[in-house]
């Protein structure tokens, strides 16, 4: 029995004593032991803050994103090692795919998310706020990485995904992590951490690992740390109410257990395509990972007139799920993670059976392929029927963290919504319906109690990611019972590791800090036309004011003919009585085009490669013939681009603020345009 090591303060260290024995879920053999006894937890957190944090926080979002991509590619190259080890946890290859490649997928997704952030170690949040009439005082918000560590206390069911889905986010944000996986499957987390450290891709201190008890870890956290917890409600409550967490105002995110449901909508009848989808999805969510998924379907609601058809069809589908050794390729459902977990599931199922009846499966026996039901933690899928879900509360309260689910009747959609909410807050739920009116009514009614809702029908089924899959760019978490937390969810998830601070000052100061040009800030004389500068040479704030162009009626007529846009406002002969205009008015797109005619410099080849589009464009005042158009043209923001192929031209995106002014100096239009600009260091 090998003792797992802890990776702390830059080295692999074994804890004292024999530790907790960890068993193979399939044959019951003791394979590892885990202990953190004797480790100095205060110094672990301190090392992360002192060494890992400064190394990560000085990198830009783009550098961190590229680091994540490199790590994801490296781990993909070693994935077979993890698959081989994962069989010990009772998981089939398909189950392990979620844990291993799903986890690595989070690194890839967060790597790509860097494009939503500037090439700086910090970023802005939301919109600039004008605070003065004269335009010399304004406000904004910035987000900077917290100075502590992200401490992740994870559940046993996804030892790899559980680490990577969280670390991908804190690393992109610029914070180091200390990971404390649940002990019983911590050998998988340890294997991946070993690979990560061997890759040398992360800066020192960015990741530490504790395999075994959390000891007095929480006694050493500070306000600059972030603690995340995934696990049972009871442990979560204990940790969330820890005195130190409360006293220090430590950010605490909790993902606890959840009684997720699926609703078969009243429009779906036996034999219809949606009916088949419902049966397939429900079976999958009961049996994948032997039901040890926080998002698994625990409650099934069906119209009372098809209730019997539902449990008969589900029972039949479940009977076609081969169970046994996950190494046998025919097997579709493996073992629970430990004999202890099986015992807990059986006990909880017994509690539900006080009012419910068993309509499929057995608590005591199961037919197995290549496995011994005494030694391994196998359990038959169990389908229960609870006929009175409004009176009997247990089914909405007790989570059987295994292949157990309960079918229940409802009379109308309103009842279905009320029953879905009886879970007191869930991670996710699904409704299967081909009727978008029903979908809307259900979603709007049930959303308050759910973190995510899937509407499943024929149109999306083929490409649907399924009821049970949390996705890196969508929120994972749920209100109330589900812990009240939120993780992943794209850009917003990253913000959980950043401090939001309001900043106030002059537009010029705010431009300097945010590296985004703010209207009314002082411009910089670029020395030459900014289209003659390479990407590296351009400075945010580089500004020119162009010469004038007088807009004539002939211009407007010609633009109408050329574009084919003969809208009444652009026609000289129109009777303008009762309209919003006095007389023939220039097309907004003509003004934008005429603006380009004024600010573009590029008759011979220069660093500007092409026009990439417009982010925003507003026409703020009608332009009548005789108006004199001038453009204030300012370098607003620079966004780096990766060179994908060696043959690609090295370049970046430059955003320009185009202020279209008339002879009175008033804005007639404003736009942010984008160009691709060559780098000098080709
Ligand atoms: P658990 O028993 O609550 O343990 C969760 C984690 O907390 C483990 O790492 C555990 O470490 C640690 N822990 C336990 N007592 C602690 C203490 N006093 N101080 C510090 N840490 C402590 O949950 P589990 O059995 O591993 O996981 C199953 C549960 O997790 C289910 O209820 C499931 O619904 C939930 N879950 C939720 C999500 C979600 O995203 N919402 C995802 C997966 C699972 P040890 O293992 O060393 O005791």
Image (cartoon, grey):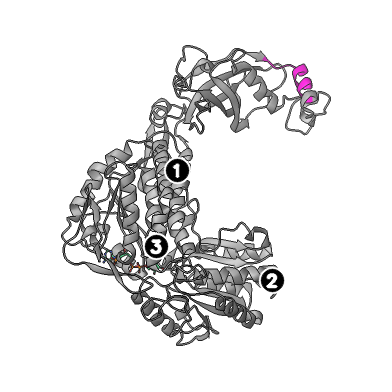
Q: Choose top left, top right, bottom left or bottom right for residue 613.
A: top right
Q: Mark 1 to mark 3: distance in Å?
A: 26 Å
Badge number at residue 111: 1
Q: Secondary structure at mark 1?
A: helix
- Residue 550 in view in this figure: yes
Mark 1 residue CB less than 8 A from any atom of ligand 1 = no
Describe the element under mark 2 as helix, strand or loop. Answer: loop
Residues at marks 3 and 2, CA–CA distance in whole angstroms: 41 Å
Whole-percent x, y for residue 14 in the image: 20, 58
Q: Residue at x 23, y 58 (%)?
A: 217
Count of numbered circles on the image:
3
Per the image, the residue denoted by label 3 is 86
The secondary element bearing badge 3 is classed as: helix
> Is residue 421 at all visible to an observer of this figure?
no
Query: Dot 2 corresponds to which residue?
Result: 267
User: Magenta stretch?
Assistant: 550-560
The image quadrant where one finds the N terminus is: bottom left
């Amino acid at each position: 029995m090998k003792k797992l090591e802890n990776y702390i303060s830059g080295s692999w260290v074994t804890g004292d004593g024999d530790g907790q024995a960890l068993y193979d879920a399939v044959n019951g053999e003791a394979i590892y032991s885990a202990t953190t006894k004797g480790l100095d937890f205060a110094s672990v957190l301190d090392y992360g803050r002192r060494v890992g944090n400064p190394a990560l926080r000085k990198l830009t979002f783009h550098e961190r994103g590229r680091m994540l991509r490199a790590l994801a590619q490296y781990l993909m190259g070693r994935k077979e090692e993890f698959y081989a080890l994962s069989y010990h946890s009772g998981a089939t290859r398909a189950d392990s795919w979620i844990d291993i490649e799903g986890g690595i997928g989070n690194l890839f997704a967060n790597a790509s998310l860097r494009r939503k952030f500037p090439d700086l170690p910090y970023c802005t949040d939301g919109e600039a706020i004008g605070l003065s009439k004269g335009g010399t005082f304004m406000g904004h918000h910035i987000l900077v990485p917290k100075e502590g560590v992200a401490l992740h206390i994870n559940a046993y069911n996804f030892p790899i995904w559980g680490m990577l889905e969280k670390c991908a986010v804190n690393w992109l944000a610029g914070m180091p992590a200390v990971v404390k996986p649940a002990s019983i499957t911590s050998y998988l987390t340890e294997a991946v951490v070993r690979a990560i450290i061997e890759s040398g891709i992360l800066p020192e201190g960015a990741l530490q690992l504790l395999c075994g008890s959390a000891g007095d870890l929480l006694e050493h956290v500070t306000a600059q740390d972030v603690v995340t917890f995934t696990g049972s409600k009871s442990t979560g409550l204990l940790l969330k109410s820890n005195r130190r967490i409360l006293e220090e105002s430590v950010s605490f995110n909790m993902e606890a257990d959840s009684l997720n449901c699926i609703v078969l909508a009243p429009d779906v009848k036996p034999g219809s395509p949606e009916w088949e989808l419902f049966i397939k999805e429900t079976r999958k969510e009961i049996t994948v990972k032997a039901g040890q998924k926080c998002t698994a379907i625990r409650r099934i609601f069906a119209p009372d007139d098809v209730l019997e058809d539902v449990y008969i069809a589900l029972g039949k589908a479940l009977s076609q799920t081969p169970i046994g050794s996950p190494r046998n390729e025919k097997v579709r459902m493996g073992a629970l993670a430990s004999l202890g977990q099986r015992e807990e599931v059986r006990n909880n199922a017994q509690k539900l059976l006080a009012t419910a009846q068993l309509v499929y499966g057995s608590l005591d026996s199961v037919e197995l392929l290549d496995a011994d039901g005494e030694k391994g933690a196998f359990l038959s899928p169990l389908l229960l029927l609870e006929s009175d879900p409004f009176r009997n509360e247990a089914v909405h309260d007790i989570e059987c963290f295994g292949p157990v689910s309960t079918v229940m009747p409802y009379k109308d959609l309103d009842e279905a919504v009320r029953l879905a909410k009886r879970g007191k807050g869930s991670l996710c739920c699904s409704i299967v319906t081909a009727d978008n009116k029903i979908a809307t009514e259900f979603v709007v009614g049930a959303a308050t109690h759910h973190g995510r809702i899937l509407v499943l029908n024929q149109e999306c089924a083929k490409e649907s990611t399924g009821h049970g899959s949390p996705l890196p760019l969508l929120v994972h978490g749920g209100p109330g019972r589900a812990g009240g937390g939120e993780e992943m969810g794209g850009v917003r998830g990253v913000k959980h590791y950043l401090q939001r601070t309001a900043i106030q000052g002059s537009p010029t100061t705010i431009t300097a800090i945010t590296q985004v040009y703010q209207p009314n800030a002082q411009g910089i004389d670029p020395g030459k036309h900014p289209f003659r500068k390479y990407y590296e040479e351009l400075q945010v704030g580089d500004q020119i004011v162009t010469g004038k162009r007088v807009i004539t009626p002939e211009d407007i007529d010609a633009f109408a003919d050329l574009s084919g846009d003969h809208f009444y406002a652009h026609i000289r002969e129109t009777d303008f009585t009762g309209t919003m205009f006095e007389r023939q008015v220039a097309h907004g797109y003509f003004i934008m085009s005429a603006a380009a005619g004024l600010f573009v410099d590029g008759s011979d080849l220069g660093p500007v490669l092409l026009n990439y589009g417009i982010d925003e464009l507003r026409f703020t005042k009608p332009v009548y013939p005789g108006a004199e158009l001038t453009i204030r043209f300012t370098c607003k923001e620079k966004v780096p681009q990766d060179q994908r192929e060696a043959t690609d031209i090295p370049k970046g995106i430059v955003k320009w603020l185009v202020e279209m002014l008339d002879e009175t100096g008033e804005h007639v239009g404003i736009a942010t345009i984008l160009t691709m600009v060559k780098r000098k260091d080709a």
